[in-house]
Each structure stands twice: as C-alpha cells, then as structure tokens.
Image: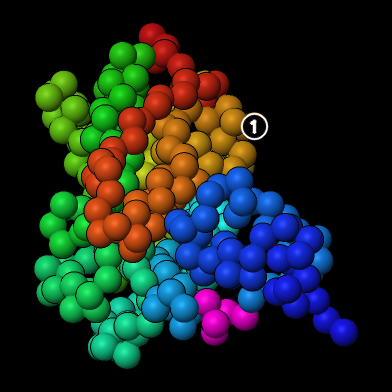
Amino acid sequence: MGINIKDVANKAGVSVSTVSRAFTRPELVSKATRAKVLAIAEELNFSISRSAMVLKSGRALRVALLMSDHIRLWFSASIIEGLNQVFHANGYDLSIFQISSIEERREFFDMLPIRRNADAVIVASFDIDTDEISQLVTVGVPIVGINCVMPTIGFNAAVNIDDDQGSKLLARHLIGLGHRRIAYVRTDRAVTLHFSVQQRYESFAQVCEQSGIDLTTIVIADGDDRISRATTELLSMDGMPTAIACQEDGIAIPLMFQLARTGLRVPFDVSMVGYDDSFYANEIGLTTVRQDPIAMATSAALKALDLIENGKTNKPFEVFPAQLLVRSSTTEVKG
C-alpha cells in the first residue's frame, strides 16, 4: 500500500493536521517542524495532492511570467532559474508566456480575462504601455517587474539594474582611454520590447555628447545575420571607430570574432565593450558591466510572495547597482 499522511505524522511525531498545515499553511507551523515534516515526507516519497492544496489555500499556486525575449538566451534563462528557485520551494508553479511578435503581444492581453488563475504576474524585460498596464491591473493580482521601464507606474513592486550608472561607467571608461571615435551597436525590435536597453543607449550617448564626441549609432534588426550586418556597417564607415560599445554581450562577443575574421584585432585595432557579464565574457576578456539576473529574479519572487501572503512587501522598488568589469578588450588609443 502507498504511504499516506498518517504515516508521515506518525514518523514525525506530530498530528495529521500539522502535516497538512506544513504543506498548505506553512505560516501556521514553526520552521523547524515544517522542515522536519517535509524531510520525512521526502524520505517516504509522500506528497499532498496539488488540488487539495489549492482548495485549502484558496490560491492557484501559480505565477505567470511574461517575457519579451527567447527563453534560451542567457538573461531569460537566468530569470527563470532565479524565479523557480523561490517559487518551487514554496509550492508554486511558473507559467511562462513568451511574447516575440505583435500578434503574440495582442493575443496575450486579449486573453487576460481568462488567465485569472495566477496568484501574481511577473513582467520581465518588457516595455509595456499604459493601456497594457491597465489590463494587467484588471487581473487583480500583484504585478512585479524585472528590468521594466517606469516600474513605479502600475507595478506593485519591481527590481531593476541601474542601467544609467552602468552605461555611464562604460562611456567614461572608453573616453578616459582617449577614444573619440566611438560606435554604439544596438538592436531595433519590431515589437518595441526594448526593456531597459533604451536607457543604456541614452545614458551612453549623453556622456558622449557632454564630452564633445559625435557618437555613431548602428541599429541592427534582430535576426540570424545581425552580426554580419553590424560588421558590414562598421567596415563601410569613412573612418573606422577606435572603440565599439554594444548594447549587450550577446552582440559584443560574436562581433569580436567576426571582426577578427576581417583582420581587426581587439583591442589593438579597436576596443570593445559589452553589457551583462554573460556567458564567456570573462573567458574572452570582454570589458563589460555586470548584472545578476538570478539575484534580481530571486528578489522579485520574494517580493511577489510577500504581496500574495501579506498584500505588501518591504522595499518594493529595488535598484541593483551596476559594476564595471575592465578586462583585456579595451586599451588606450595609440598615437
């Protein structure tokens, strides 16, 4: 016969109701008792049915995640990992809605009325407009943003990296090395899901303007050939820049290799900076700005749980400081 709740209670030396509360109402059980019950339940391979937990708690035990980028990418995967670490440990499932086109965007917001079976909505890297915020509010659950523009409008809580600080650090680093011919490579998404990268560009351009530098901006559409198109535009310029700043490491790293194939050496012929400190940035020596999406997602998840449980959270709007990491991809201008 299978293990039942009485078996767990007997081995833990507690009542059946205590075991039930350990799963469905953990706030009513001491941390030590809950840890003991869960350890024994895992040892005996026992779990309370999800439907029973939902009925008992009056919650869906589900959080909806709205994302603007491919799930396979470094930032998206890290966000999911951080959220899942917190939500899974607290008995919540994560439902992911990826928005990659105007049609998917319209469909998501049109279908919102039937998506009320979530206890919170996490919006990650999504530049939503005021009408869409109003639609989200009608769902009647906490809305938490991660790297969203104007997070204090319509969101109950949010976490953001200080992109203004990060981009200014990068620009001042290059200018301090003597660079005056600088190009900035950025994307232009058809769905206007620019999240915080717009702030990155504007802050970088502001420092260049204040320093009397005429920044060259190269805008590339998303696509498999975007690095080739960026390379073509750079090589077609009347004078090759001495430094290239990229919106993200995902552009900077492949662009470094593409330029190397044309005979240009980083940093001897051109300096290069990225943004994110993502996969392989350290290994190839890319100067970049570090952000920690797992830490941001963990913080966002804890805020969401606070809002679900208590209707409020400490420090609802949190900004993570940027950190400049100077590596071997930048050097002083020669001559």
Residue 180: image quadrant is top left
Q: Mark 1 is on which residue type?
A: Glu
Residue 48 falls left or right of residue 320: right
Q: Magenta segment, which residues?
A: 49-53
Vertical placement of residue 188 versus 111, above or below: above
Callout 1 environment at 10 Å: few (<14), some (14 to 19), or many (20+)? Answer: few
Report the residue marked by disc 1.
283
Look at the image and name its color scheme.
rainbow
Q: Left or right of 192: which side holds 104?
A: right
Viewer can see residue 84? no
**Residue 55 at x, y = what percent?**
46, 83
Q: Nearer the viewer, residue 267 or 154?
A: 154
| The image quarter in which residue 69 lies | bottom left
Q: Is 266 on the left or on the right of 196, as rendered? A: right
State the image coordinates of residue 221 (x, y, percent, origin top left): 36, 63
Q: Main secondary structure of the magenta part?
A: helix
Secondary-structure class at tag 1: loop
x%, y% of residue 209? Answer: 14, 29
- Residue at 78% across, 61% down: 11
Residue 78 lies within the magenta run: no
Q: Residue 237 appears in which quarter of the rendering? A: top left
